[in-house]
Image (cartoon, rainbow, N blue to C red):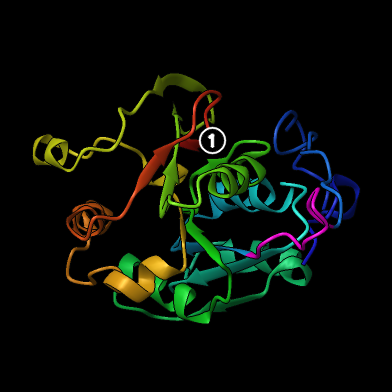
Amino acid sequence: MRCPTLSELPPPPPGKTGWPWTEESPQLPDTMPDGRPWPRISIVTPSYNQGQFIEETIPSVLLQGYPNLEYIVIDGGSTDNSVDIIPEYERWLACWVSGTDKGQANAINKGRMLSKGEIITYLNSDDTLQADAVSRAVASLQQHPEADFVFGLCNLMNSAGKVFMTLHPPPFNITQLAFGNCFCQQTVFFRRRVLDGIGMLGVNFHFVFDYEFWPRAGLQGLAFVKIPQPPLANFR
């Protein structure tokens, strides 16, 4: 699916301005400069009772201006207004489901199994992508065919969406993971071949499933490439 334009999406809530409410990424041409089609990118959003935030998350994905996006939302059976908000964007979603699951990692795995993209990421329902994040990630993967993962800088924001800090992760080094998670998942994009090589997220790691995923990739010798400024995402 080609990403919609701002005018196609539902209007923002009253008083909301800026990205991604009243601003959008430029629309990319239908093909890459060499005439080839853009690689499909699949983005999975797991969600549970995040209605106060998901209405910002979804437009931040849909307004990337990318010509070949597959967006999947896996809701864990929310009892708030999430299941009223998500259908407003249904026409631009590859699919969405709402029902009980075995936790966040299980929800992400469900979305990944439904996905068909050559490039994959997931974005939690209280976080947002920055404008042009997808095109920058795809460009980096194109420039670095040896890279399995790309990642970048990430803003930290509060519940109101105000940015108060930017995290500058170091280049990936598996030994650094012994001292803590050194980069933000919100900025990580990877090739589908990663799943073929190391499998899905560990569903028993309910709070550190991505932190477990990185060293598993590093131990297999998979390559991580850092994308420089500006930040790719916002972490609430």
Residue at position x 70%, y 33% in the image: 19
Which of 137 and 7 lies nearest the eye of the viewer? 137
Residue at position x 74%, y 47% in the image: 63
Residue 117 visible in this rendered orientation of the protein: yes
- Quadrant including the C terminus: top left
Count of marks placed on residues? 1
Percent x, y of residue 120:
50, 62
Q: Looking at this view, name the residue that lies furthest to the left.
A: 178
Amino acid on which disc 1 is placed: Leu
Residue at position x 45%, y 45% in the image: 150
- Quadrant including the N terminus: bottom right
Callout 1 secondary element:
loop
Magenta stretch, overall SS: loop
Residue 203 position by quadrant: bottom left
> Is 81 left or right of 163, judged from the image as shown?
right
Range of magenta residues: 31-40
Q: Is residue 120 above or below residue 66?
A: below
Residue at the spot of label 1: 232
Which of 157 and 129 lies nearest the eye of the viewer? 129
Residue 38 position by quadrant: bottom right
Percent x, y of residue 162:
53, 24
Q: Is residue 19 above or below residue 217?
A: above
Crowd around label 1: few <14 · some 14–19 · many ≥20 (10 Å): many
Q: Is residue 116 above or below residue 46?
A: below
Which of 19 and 49 lies nearest the eye of the viewer? 19
Percent x, y of residue 157:
46, 28
Q: Is residue 164 magenta?
A: no
Q: Looking at this view, name the residue that lies furthest to the right.
A: 7
